[in-house]
Image (tube, rainbow, N blue to C red):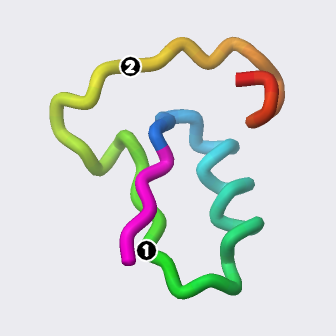
Amino acid sequence: MKLLIATRNKDKIIEIREILKDLDLEIISAFDIPGMPDVIEDRDTIKGN
């Protein structure tokens, strides 16, 4: 199963991958979806955004 992480924030992608590493998931991000619009992510944490 694929899970889309709708971000281009590399640190957040790494953090989410670490959290979900034991699950049988293919983690993809906004980098993997051509034409996906940018999202403003101006907080320091996943929860903040």
Residue 26: image tag: 1
* Circle count: 2
Which amino acid, by three-letter code, is at mark 2?
Asp
Q: Is residue 36 above or below residue 10?
A: above
On the rendered structure, is 35 left or right of 11? left
N-term mark: 2 or 1: 1
Bin the neighbour count of mark 1 within 10 Å (Cα to Cα): few under 14, some 14-19, many 20 and up. Answer: few
Tell me the residue at 79%/23% (across/down).
48
On the rendered structure, is 8 left or right of 31? right
- Classified by dominant secondary structure, the portion drawn in magenta counts as strand
Q: Is residue 45 above or below residue 25?
A: above
Q: Quadrant of the C terminus?
A: top right
Tell me the residue at 69%/13% (across/down).
42
Dot 2 corresponds to which residue?
38
Q: Quadrant of the N terminus?
A: bottom left
Residue 18: image tag: none
Give how far across and how far down residue 11 sits, in percent. Answer: 68, 43
SS state under label 1: strand
First to last magenta residue range: 1-5
Tell me the residue at 68%/71% (across/down).
20
Give how far across and how far down residue 19 sits, in percent. Answer: 76, 66
Q: Is residue 34 above or below residue 26?
A: above
Which amino acid, by three-letter code, is at mark 1?
Glu
SS state under label 2: loop
Tell me the residue at 37%/40% (across/down).
30
Give how far across and how far down residue 41 sits, in percent. Answer: 62, 18
Give how far across and how far down residue 25 sits, in percent. Answer: 49, 78
On the rendered structure, is 43 left or right of 3? right
As measured in the structure, the alpha-carbon distance from the residue carrying label 2 to the one carrying label 1 is 22 Å
